[in-house]
Image (cartoon, rainbow, N blue to C red):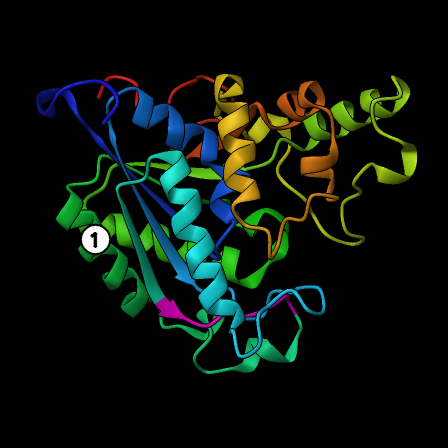
Amino acid sequence: MVAGTVADMATLVTFHAHPDDECLRTAGVMRKAVEEGHRVVLVVATKGEVGEVPDGFLAEGEKLEDRRVQESYAAAEILGVERVEFLGYRDSGMMGEPTNDDPACFWRADVEKAAAQLAAILREESADVLTVYDDNGDYGHPDHIQVHRVGLRAAELAGTKRVFQATFNREFMQRGFEAAVADGVIPPEAAPKPPENVEFGKPEAEITAAVDVSKYAAVKRAAMRAHPSQISEDMFMLAMPDDAFTFAFGTEWFIRWGEGPGITETDLMAGL
């Protein structure tokens, strides 16, 4: 624990679908909470079994899920996470893929059963704050949507009142990438584009919390690098210059369950 005392320590539980999701969505608020003396717990629904890796990346006989679990622990150490738990479901893959039909995948999980698993952790930790995803799971990924459903139900079961749905600010991202291309920071061909026919993130008007995590940009980037099976050095998140990365990833966006619309909060742990 970096700062604070037991008396003023609160607990943030952050719930994600796959290893590496935590770095992309909540790494800043996780490290911020740690630096401010709070306890951070990471819960991951799956081990990311169907992620894609380059040929020859894995050692002979090595399973992708084993590598991704190792990467999760490495990133968690960088972020200061004190507990990591996996719920044990299989990765469902992208929406519409045959892997969605696997009875062991998270998309097919019974919401009440999965919520009871998470609620047990929330009770054990006396969780003050829980993060999940927005109702579209950022971009329609089945496991992300299920994190939303399971997470909200778990909060109800455990009595966790402060729930934030991690999302992306659609307009902010578009403005930022357009500016980066215009300024020559990012080549036009390297600028990420939302998948076609997919709603990516949420409109700015629906967001209720914007947390400035620019102070932790380097730590966030280091945590991303701890997931080399999914985030390679030539991907735009790691390839862009430091100032561009800080602009793009230096704010984390949330919708507080039961609040809004309108951005009125800048700290998930305020008052705790």
> Which residue is at 55% across, 63% downward?
142
Give SS at disc 1: helix
User: What's the magenta region?
Assistant: 88-95
Estimate how packed mark 1 is, as few (under 14), some (14 to 19) or many (20 or more) residues with alpha carbons within 10 Å. Answer: some
Q: Is residue 162 left or right of residue 158?
A: right
**Quarter of the rendering occupied by the N terminus:** top left
Judged by its main secondary structure, the magenta piece is loop
x%, y% of residue 147?
Answer: 43, 55
Q: Which residue is mark 1?
A: 121
Q: Is residue 133 left or right of residue 245?
A: left
256 lies left or right of 186: left
Residue located 69% across and 47% down the image: 199
Question: Where is the C terminus found, in terms of image quarters?
Answer: top left
Kind of residue at disc 1: Ile
Which x, y percent locates residue 31?
A: 39, 29
Residue 266 x %, y %: 43, 17
Residue 251 appears in view: yes
Q: Position of residue 132 (x, y in %)?
A: 42, 45
Residue drawn at x 63%, y 49% as measured from the top left: 231
Q: Is residue 246 magenta?
A: no
